[in-house]
Image (tube, grey):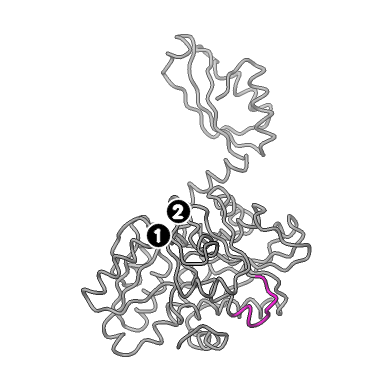
Amino acid sequence: MKKVTLETIKNARETIKDIINITPVLESTKMSEKTGANVYLKCENLQKTGSFKIRGACNKIANLTDEEKANGVIASSAGNHAQGVALGAKMNGIDATIAMPATAPLAKVKATKGYGAKVVLNGLVYDDAYAKAVEIQKETGATFLHPFDDEYVISGQGTISLEIFEQLNENVDTIVCPIGGGGIIAGVATAAKALNPSVKIVGVQTSNIPSMKESVKNGKVTTAFNANTVADGIAVKTPGNLTFDIIKDLVDEVITVEEDEIYQAMLFLLEYQKVAAEGAGAVSTAAIWSGKYQPKKDENVVCIISGGNVDTNTLYRVIDKGLVKCGRRFSFRTHIENKTGGLSQVTAILNELDANILDANMSKDKSSQGINKLAVEITIEIFDHEHIAKIVEALTNAGFEIK
């Protein structure tokens, strides 16, 4: 096998058809109304292991030689490829070791171990885990399974496009897809462009780690890292050589989204679509919800929700940040009279303006305002930013300094 083609992707589909789920395509009424387009979600969060990665991993494992299988397998992963490899190895009776970043969500680490793989934690991002996997591979002679820069892996991921075209009766204008190392979008683009060369392929990265965007801009594989990201599944500082070659030829546009936009997309998917998406899985939605990608009227757009393996504690923090960003949760600090009923004037104003108090904490620190004042920190639940402005105005008019 020397390159990825529609034929290799169809072969991959035949290879993994009894292993994977054909995941649903759901219409997003909210995003369709917002954009005037017809927006759909390809829900790979409902795939086995909670991610598309099992497609490529199982296709790769199925094509290993008997000798390669006997040596056991090793992989590096931010978490989703880990689970795909672990399950695929378990199904084939193969020993598996997975190197993962120490920052990988606990849920992904636990799930990988649950499939029977040995897990080694190293570094902050995928690239650190990759370095550790290479080190272990040299020591043990295990067969290395690359998470994205491999023809069999890319072909497995490309089966997503085959399903999308069948599920939408080929009425597909644009596919919006996450990019980390580039495995999923390379496969998706190869199949989609072969089925219909006019289909637009839009890749999305976090602006914290825009490695493929920088690579396309520079015309060569480029390392890029600005900060860690909630989208751990696409936290790849250096994309693949094979994936880059495919992407530069077949992907029409690569855009980036901010962390706050990812939070809001995760919240939107959870609240309005009943879809639990991890950060990487939500970036395609973030691109449209934020307006970074603006589809044309009646354009048929598919957002690939690549995974749903989000740690519960992470999801809690994301929801909180998302609510704050969209103006539905607001925290402020003020000072009240240090006397009986001192807080009641504040709560009366909040009650009158239909604000729900989630938390109120009074501080014993009186130094800044004198002994007759108490500091109070309040978190409220409100409707939107306009509602916040009305509340701040009312409190300020009543003599409260809001911070």
Query: Amino acid under label 1?
Result: Ala
- Identify which residue is drawn at 26% across, 83% down: 71
- Identify which residue is drawn at 65% across, 23% down: 349
Residue 209, given in percent of the width and then of the height, sits at 47, 56
Classed neighbour count for the residue bearing mark 1: other residues with Cα under 10 Å, few (<14), some (14–19), many (≥20): some
Location of residue 329 (image quadrant): top right
Along the line of sight, which residue is nearer the eye, 45 or 81? 81
Along the line of sight, which residue is nearer the eye, 178 or 168? 178
- Identify which residue is drawn at 34% across, 89% down: 65
- Where are the magenta residues, as a range? 191-200
Q: Earlier in the sequence, mark 1 or mark 2?
A: 1
Residue position for label 2: 312
Quadrant placement of the N terminus: bottom left
Along the line of sight, which residue is nearer the eye, 298 or 48? 298
**Pointer 1 with pointer 2, Cβ within 8 A:** yes
Location of residue 28 (image quadrant): bottom right
Q: Is residue 130 left or right of residue 357?
A: left
Classed neighbour count for the residue bearing mark 2: other residues with Cα under 10 Å, few (<14), some (14–19), many (≥20): few
Residue 41, given in percent of the width and then of the height, sits at 63, 66
The number of callouts visible is 2
Residue 156, given in percent of the width and then of the height, sits at 50, 80
Residue position for label 1: 107
Q: Distance between the Cα atoms at labels 1 and 2? A: 8 Å
Residue 213, given in percent of the width and then of the height, sits at 54, 61
From the viewer's perspective, is residue 228 above or below residue 362? Answer: below
Q: Is residue 4 left or right of residue 30?
A: left
Query: Amino acid under label 2?
Result: Thr
